Amino acid sequence: MDRPRFAFRQLEKALVLIGLFCIFSILNDAFLFGVAFVLIGMAAKMVLYQHKDIKLQLTVPDKSDAREKSRRLKEAVVVNRLYQDAELTLSSLAVKLGIHPHELSRIINTGLDKNFSDFINEFRVREVSRKMRDPAYDNLTLLGIAYESGFNSKTTFNRVFREITGKTPLEYKKEVPIDKLAPLPRMRPVILRQNIPKRKFMIRNYFKIAYRQLLRQKMYATVKIGGFALGIAACLLIGLYIHNETTFDRFYPGADRIFRVVGDGEMSRGLAWPAPMSKAIQQDFPEVEFAGRMRLINSYLGHAELRPAEQSQNTYEQGIIYIDQSFFSAFKLPMVYGDGATALKQPQTMVISKAMADKYYRGQNPLGQVMYIDNDQSHPYRIGGVMADIPANSHLHPFNFFITLSGMEFGAGEQNSWRWYNYIQYIKLKAGTNVAAFEEKLNTGLRKNYWMPEARKGGAQDPKKEAGKFHVYLQPVPDINLYSYDFSDGLTNGDIRFVWLFGAVALFILIIACINFINLSTAKSAGRAKEVGLRKVVGSYRSSLIAQFLTESLIYSFISFILGIMVAWLLLPYFNSIAAKSLTMPWFEWWFVPVILLSTLVVGTLAGLYPAFYLSGFRPGQVLKGTISTGSKSPMLRNGLVVFQFAASIILIISTIVIYNQMHFILSRKVGFDKDQVMVLQGTNTLGDQPIRNFKTELGKIAAVKSASISDYLPINGTARNGNAFFNEGREKMILLFWARFGK
C-alpha cells in the first residue's frame, strides 16, 4: 500500500472519531475532552513521525511533447514489427523500448488518444490488409495471416477487424479485384476507425453476456430474480389497492363540481341537515345548479323488507335510500330503462338498479311495476326507472333502491322545520364557480336568513352569536371515500391514513428488494473480479463495464417484473378476500404497460447503479495478482446496506407479530356474550305488534333457543336506532340543543 493513501486513511479514521465525540458531546460535555485528546494525538504523531519523503506530485501532461513521442513510438513499432508479437503487453513493449510502463501509457493515451489495445491492433489490421492483397500470401488462410500479423485468437481477429474497417475479413477481401492483388507500398494506410454503428454490436454483446451469466449461475439468478419478483408483486398489489381508493367517484359528469355539505362548527358537526335547507340553497344562490338530499331508510342501516306487488314473499334488502330528483340529476347516473331527469319527480316512485331488476323482473321491463316496502300495502311504490349498476369505486355503490322524497314527511311539519336534522345535503355548482368564495357566501347567507331567525325563535339572548356557531364547508365528492373517517354516514369508506400507510409499506418493500438485489450483486463480486480485470487489461473502458452491468440489471429487472406481475395476478383473489375489494388486473388500461416499462427502467437502473460502479472499479493489477481492491477507502456503504436490510426485515417481522397479536386479541376478546351464538332476525317489524310477541313465544319453545328478546335498538355499530330523545320536561333550551346536535 502506498504511504500517501495510508496517511489519508489514518486521517479519515481520526476525523470519524472526532465526529463521534462531537455527536456524543450533545449528551454530555465530557466527550469534548475526547476531541481534544484526538487532536493532541494527531499533532504529536506529525511531530514525531515526519514523512519528508512523501510528496504528492501532479503530472501536467504536455500534449506537444506527447505527440512527438507518439510519432517516434509508431515508427519504432513499425520498423521493428513489434506488433507481430502475439504476447505483447504494455509492460513487455515498455521493456523492449527501454521506458517506464507509466510513461508509455501516457504517450499512447495523451499523444494518440487511444488505449494500448487499439494502438497495437491498428498495426495488426494494417498488416493483415497488406498481406491479403499480396499474392505471396495466397497459400495462407485468413486465420493464418491473422496469426502471422500478431493476433492470437480468431474471435478477437474478426471482432477487431470489423470494428476498425467496418467489414468482416471475407467481405473486405472480396471487394478487392483479382488484378489488383499485388504488393502495395509497405506503409500504405488503410481506413481506420470508420464511423460505423459500433454501439449496436456492444449492446448485443451486453445482452449475450447477461444471458450467459443467467445460464451459468442458475441458483444465484433464481434467488436474485425471485426475491425481486416477490417484492414487486407485493408493491403491485398495494399499488392496485391505492389506485382503487384514490379513483373513487371521479367518473360522474362534472364530478369536480359536486359537493357534500359538511358541518364543522360548534353547533353543526357532521352530515345531518334540516329538510328545507336544500330548497333554500337552490333558491338563494344562483351559483348552484342542483341541490338535493339523501336519507337512509329505517334510520342508519338503509334496509327493509321488499316484494313485488304480484308476489307474497318478502325479501330482506339493504342499500335503500330516499333522495330528491335533483340529487339524481346532479349525478346523472346512466339509465337502462326510463328517463333519469323525471324518474323520481312523482310521489311514491322509485328507481332500482339493473341487478335488482334482473333479480325481481328477469327478462322484463320493470317500468310501471309496483313494489311494497315493509309489507305496507297502503303505500305502493311504482318503478319509474332502472339505472345501470353503480361501479364499485363509488360511495353510492352499496345502494340499489332510490326512493323519491317527493311528498314524503317523517313527522308533522318535518319538511319545513329547521330543527330536524335528518338529511345529507349535496350540491352541484355551475361551471366556473369559485368554490372558496361560494363557501363563504353560503355560510353568510344561511346564518343571516335561517339560523339567526331560528335562534331568535328559540329564545336565544344573542341570536347572531348562536348563528355564528354554525359553519359548513363543501366536501368534494371524490374526497368522500378517503376523508370521511370522522363522519357517521352509514357508508363503508376508506381512510387516507391507510393509503399513506400502505404506500409507505410498498415503498419500504421495494427499497428492501432493491437493497437485496444490490447486496447479492456485490456479494458475487469475487466471481466477476477476474472478468473485470481481464477486460480492463485488453483495453475495455470503465464506461463500457458500467453499461454492461446496468444492462444486466435491467434484464434482471424486466424478468422480475414479468414474474412479479404473474405472481400478483395469481394472488389477487386472496388479496381481494383480505382487503374486501374486487380488484382486477388492469391489462387493457392505457397506462398499465407504460407504467410497468417505466418502473422496470427506473427500478432496474437504481438497483444496478451501485453494483455497476462497484464492480467496474476493480483494479486489474491487484485483481490478477489475487488481491481484490476497488480503490474505495472502506466498504462502509456496502456494509450499511446489509445492516439496513437485516434491520428492516426484523422491523417488518416484529410489526407483523404485533399486528397479528392485536387482531387476535380483538377477535377473541370476551365482550359479554358469545357472538357466534347470538342471532339477529331482520325485518320482524313487518309482523305487527302482537304477532311479533307471539313469534317470540314460539321461538322460546325451540330446544336450541336459550332465550329470545325484542328490541328496536342494539348497542353495537352498524345497527338502527329509533331516534327518540330523552330530556327533562319543560327544558325548552335542551330541546333546541338536542336538535342542533342531532346530526353529530
Image (cartoon, rainbow, N blue to C red):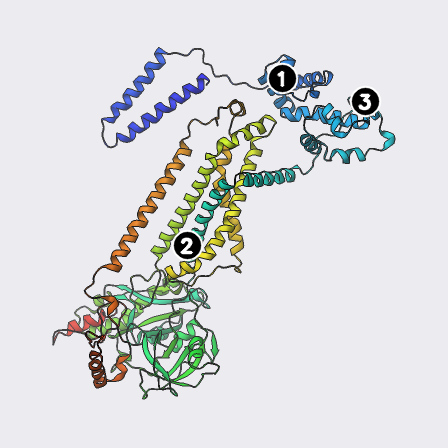
Q: Is residue 225 above or below residue 154?
A: below
Where disc 3 sits, the SS reads: loop
Residue at image location 32% in from the left, 78% down from the top: 304
**Quarter residue 287 falls in:** bottom left
Q: Residues within 10 Å of mark 2 (few under 14, many from 20)?
A: many
In the rendered image, which residue does mark 3 sit on?
A: 185
Question: Label 3 sits on what residue type?
Answer: Pro
**Label 3 crowd bin: few (<14), some (14–19), many (20+), radius 10 Å:** few
Q: CA distance from mark 1 to mark 3?
A: 29 Å
Disc 1 crowd rating (10 Å Cα; few below 14, some 14-19, many 20+) is few
Q: Nearer the viewer, mark 1 or mark 3?
A: 1
Q: Secondary structure at mark 2?
A: helix
Q: Residue 657: horizontal and vertical position, in percent?
A: 30, 49
Instruction: State which quadrant residue 491 falls in.
Output: bottom left
> Percent position (x, y) of residue 600?
51, 47
Q: Estimate the x, y position of residue 221 in percent, counting from the top left.
A: 50, 42
Tell me, yes or no, whether the two marked residues, 3 and 2, touch with CB atoms within 8 Å.
no
- What's under tag 2, amino acid-wise? Ile
Q: Nearer the viewer, mark 2 or mark 1?
A: 1
Tell me if I can see residue 342 in this picture.
Answer: no
Q: Earlier in the sequence, mark 2 or mark 1?
A: 1
Q: Disc 1 residue type?
A: Ser
Gap in angstroms between the C-alphas marked 3 and 2: 72 Å
Query: Which residue is label 1 attached to?
Result: 92
Residue 407 vertical placement versus 295 (above, below): below
Q: Residue at coordinates 46% horizontally, 17% vertically from top-left?
A: 2
Residue 556 placed where, x, y %? Answer: 52, 44
Q: Nearer the viewer, residue 705 or 517?
A: 705
**Closer-to-camera residue (71/742):** 71
- 423, above or below 74, in the image: below
